[in-house]
Amino acid sequence: MDVYVIGVATHPAEDAVRNMRLEEMVYKTARAALDQAGVLRSQIDHVTLAACDEIDARGITSMLLAAPAGAYLKDEMRVTDSGLTGLHLGAMRVASGDLGLGLVVSWNQSAVVPLEDIARIRAEPFFLRPIAMNFAIAEGLYANQVLNNNNWSETQVAAQVHALMAVAQRNPRAVKRPVKSIDEISTTEMLAYPLRVGHRAPITDGAVAMVLASGDWVRKHPDIKPLAKIAATAWAVNRYQLDAQRLNDIDFFTQTMQLAITRAGLKSLDDLDFVELDSQNAWVDLMLSEVFKNASNVALSPSGGAWAQNPYFCTGLMNAAEAVLQVSDLAGANQIV
């Protein structure tokens, strides 16, 4: 894949952005990414948006956010799955050979709406919605399955949160909050057994933008130095039904990870220096970490992951931005490579 990241920007981390409109957040972040890349909006030929109508509390959020995101009179596409899906689409558009310079923008202002209510609305209407399925219950079901399969203790889970919080506080782009002790985490309110409040990464507001360029565009502009190359992408969609088979399916993640490694021309996980995991709670983080337990040279979530900042819809793209900063030696205090 001949695709490069030449600019990246993240909105300053805050639990809740109260002093500006969402349009302002998106504009400032997109503008900052273009400025870092050293290009003008007039030079880009397409924009990929990643946004959720329900979280933004708007019927069609891109109607109001496309222009602030830089898409006015540009070739525009939008995804509603996640910010990271937006990066996949943006990279494929560049890799197609039809487009040369694009902007990927995603945002989240969950402080204006309760996410758990959105989860209940989105649940399957005939079975899951009547039992009030939400994120907490779904995460609790997964955590219980992980507990049964691995016999991990609550102390191990709390220790994982403590470690991630400590790493996150070195990150200059993280929300600054006290690092809780293992005991404090282990005694937080129970949400859905065995999931506790302290096991979950706090939700924040935020926005992130990346400028993507094709290899041809980069070669024609030798004055622009890429920050990173997107060597490969891979993704898959698992079953919707939350039954035992789905909750046990860590192979699904492993196979997709291996596919990306193969497409990038690498041999194994040992060829990686670090991985940013997109984990909303410590039970998931522990489970995903198991995939890398035999890859001793791989650092996991050097940014602190979702415990640094967690703008729910675009956390995946935020993690990708952190990866770009790592490989371009711009990560700051939590630089590892």
Image (tube, rainbow, N blue to C red):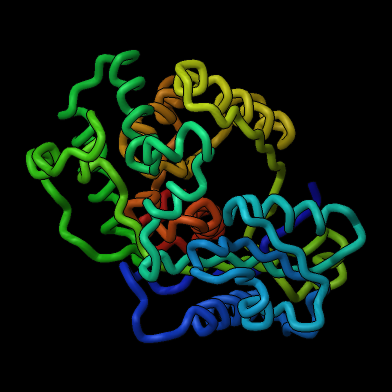
- For image coordinates 61% across by 51% down, the residue present is 81
Residue lying furthest right in this view? 98
- Tell me if residue 90 comes above or below residue 19 in the rendering: above
User: In terms of depth relative to the viewer, which is nearer, 157 or 243?
Assistant: 243
Residue 183: image quadrant is top left
Q: Does residue 252 appear left or right of residue 123 in this picture? A: right
- For image coordinates 38% across by 28% down, the residue present is 142
Query: In x, y percent, where is residue 152?
Result: 24, 20
User: In terms of depth relative to the viewer, which is nearer, 295 or 290?
Assistant: 290
- Tell me if residue 104 comes above or below residue 32 in the rendering: above
Residue 45: image quadrant is bottom right
Q: Does residue 184 appear left or right of residue 255 in this picture? A: left
- For image coordinates 30% across by 15% down, the residue present is 148
Inspect this view and state whether residue 163 appears.
yes
- Tell me if residue 337 comes above or below residue 127 in the rendering: below
User: In terms of depth relative to the viewer, which is nearer, 37 or 45?
Assistant: 45
Q: Does residue 66 appear left or right of residue 123 in this picture? A: right
- Tell me if residue 213 comes above or below residue 42 in the rendering: above
Query: In x, y percent, where is residue 79?
Result: 68, 57
- For image coordinates 81% across by 82% down, the residue present is 73
